[in-house]
Image (spheres, rainbow, N blue to C red):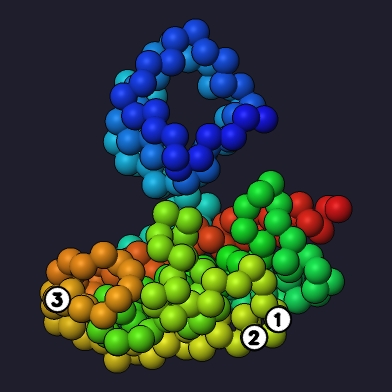
Amino acid sequence: MANYTNSDDFSGSLFLDTNMSGSVFREADLSGVKMHGVLLIGADIDGAIEGLRVNGVEVAPLIEAELNRRQPERALLRSRTPQELREGWAWMQGIWAATMKRAEALPPADLDRSVNDEWSFAQTLRHLIFVTDSWLSHAVLAESRPFHRLALPAGFIDDGHTYGIDNVKSAPFEEVAAARADRMAKVQSFLDEVTQEELERVREPNPAPGWPSPAARTALYCVHVVLNEEWAHHEFAVRDLAIIEAG
């Protein structure tokens, strides 16, 4: 398979009568892409989908409705009140606890195992540490050095050395799990105490190095990012665990 990386820019290109069957697009920006007369059979898409129309029908609302039908508690993750956010976080903690128990029953090597070139289970936990450090500790609480050394940024973000991140490929799972538990407790503590006024208050940019990029944001916006990432990466984790368990 030919590899095209971030050094290759295909923006504004026309692909005509081109065979892309079996191709993989990972961390690719497909914003504004128009596809006409295409064959899209057996495709598998996950990502931030908004404004996508298929045969004249906007897809995102249909997907949201179906996901919420499968998991009614998921709608709480997008609520706007402290109490409902607490309920959504309690549900999220519960499904993660069950998944952690499932993962810990596997051989340690499997927790560092990649499926289809995605993050391993341990790397997924490390990324969620980064998400909490970024969107809660940095963006909402304005801490000067919030990043755990084992936090794992997404590929499109700076590798994190300037934030105090070690950027190691792997680490002892017990250490990763402990850091992850600490960050989950931090989210719980924030939601336990936050008021409606504090949720809606705009936070000014944190001048310390870190992610997200500087902007004025409400705590509610940032909490929604954290909860969405929690849900999405849990879906990825259980998908990959099933493949590993099946051998």
Which residue corresponds to the image point at 48% horizontal and 15% vertical from the top-left? 38
Q: Which residue is mark 1?
A: 172
* Residue 95 at x, y percent in the picture: 58, 71
Category of crowding for the residue at label 1, using alpha-carbon neighbours closer than 10 angstroms: few (below 14), some (14–19), many (at least 20)? few
* Residue 212 at x, y percent in the picture: 30, 67
Category of crowding for the residue at label 3, using alpha-carbon neighbours closer than 10 angstroms: few (below 14), some (14–19), many (at least 20)? some
Residue type, label 3: Glu
Q: Secondary structure at mark 3?
A: loop
Left or right position of 123 against 15? right
Residue type, label 1: Pro
Q: Which residue is mark 2?
A: 175
Of 167 and 237, the residue lying toward us: 167
CA distance for labels 2 and 3: 33 Å
Residue type, label 2: Glu
Left or right position of 113 against 237? right
Query: Is the C-beta separation of discs 2 and 1 under 8 Å?
Result: yes
* Residue 80 at x, y percent in the picture: 25, 69
Quarter of the image where one finds residue 22: top right
Of 153 and 105, the residue lying toward us: 153
Category of crowding for the residue at label 2, using alpha-carbon neighbours closer than 10 angstroms: few (below 14), some (14–19), many (at least 20)? few
Q: Mark 3 or mark 2, which is nearer the start of the sequence?
A: 2
Which residue corresponds to the image point at 42% horizontal and 87% vertical from the top-left? 186
Which residue corresponds to the image point at 66% horizontal and 49% vertical from the top-left? 117
Q: Mark 1 or mark 3, which is nearer the start of the sequence?
A: 1
Which residue corresponds to the image point at 50% horizontal and 40% vertical from the top-left? 5
CA distance for labels 2 and 1: 5 Å
